[in-house]
Image: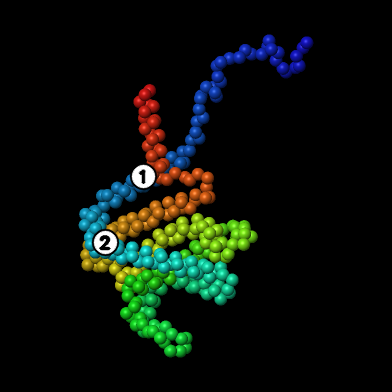
Amino acid sequence: MSEPPGVLSVAEAPPPTDTPSKTVRSGRVRPLRRPGRWIATAVVLVLVAQFVHGLATNPFYQWDRFRYWFLRPTILDGLVVTLEVAALSAVLGLLGGVVLALARLSGSPVLRAVSWTYTWLFRSIPLIVLLIFLYNFSALYQTLSLGVPFGPAFVSFDESKLATDLAIAVIGLSLNEAAYASEVVRGGILSVDQGQHEAAAALGLPKGYQFSRIVLPQALRSIVPNYVNQLIGLIKSTSLVFYVSLLDLFGSVQSMGATYPGDIVPLLLVATVWYLILTSAVSVLQYYVERYFARGATRTLPPTPLQRLRTGLGGLRERIRREAAV
């Protein structure tokens, strides 16, 4: 019986062979060459090397004077003031932001209007203008009083005695920070799915219980990382309190720079390095806070930098061991 045309019979079929083809014999897939990536990497490495070489060899930076000033008591005292102002402003700003956000989301049109106006006003005014205005506030109101509106005052305060340099700095930064924190908190609350609100209402839970046990824990996943990121801007904003006569880190550097004009560059480098240390510490905190609140949103948490380093070192040791065995 004849075979259909175009089909090899068993007798005519080529015998099987154990010799693989050229494609199979190669054994691996070659990665796509990307010359542009290598060229860009080489250019970046050259620029970084030139920058580091300039930092190390340029005598204008005066690294010996940098080491002298870095841990001087006057610099450390200014650093303590910076930390104090930043901590107080962060706490007060967050509390004010929570109140403003809840007022913005309330059913009262008066509270919504006041909250919106506050946020609009203090996000529009530059921080330096606000601080200088508060510094000269005693020229407008010499005394502050508590009592019946348009009536007798029960308690009066001398504004010039209450408004110390530290108080002015903390109040100004807190007022500014509350405006931004309110939007962070409001955005976090609005990020919770509406179905969560409906499910809580269907269970007949009280409003306060719905917010504290269902809405807020989910909103914190968005609020906390964003507000920790806001702290970085707050730490840098503390450098402006120098203009209200408070000697923080930047104020101490400016004061020493005026006394020792030849050391202005190393003093500015001292301030830069300390701000880098502070913001880097907050960035590390932000990473772990984001990782903590991502537990309910991802199946597997990404490894931390320390875990990745241990994994990389373990793989490198294993590779060296295999090569040594060969």
Identified at 56% across, 62% down, the residue is 210
Rendered image quadrant of residue 280:
bottom left
| x and y percentages locating residue 37 in the rendered image | 46, 41
* Circle number at residue 201: none
Q: Residues within 10 Å of mark 1 (few under 14, many from 20)?
A: few
Residue 46, x across and y down, in percent? 36, 44
Residue 169 located left or right of residue 220: left
Q: Nearer the viewer, mark 1 or mark 2?
A: 2
**Kind of residue at badge 2:** Leu
Distance of label 1 from label 2 (alpha carbons): 36 Å
| Cβ atoms at labels 1 and 2 below 8 Å apart | no
Say if 324 sits above or below 17 in the image: below
Give the structural element (helix, strand or loop) at label 2: helix
In the picture as drawn, the residue positioned furthest to the bottom comes out as: 151
Residue 173: where, in percent of width, then height? 40, 69
For residue 89, which quarter of the picture?
A: bottom left
Q: Residue at x 29, y 47 (%)?
A: 53
Compared to residue 306, the image places residue 240 above or below, namely: below
User: Which residue does the numbered mark 2 point to in the structure image?
Assistant: 76
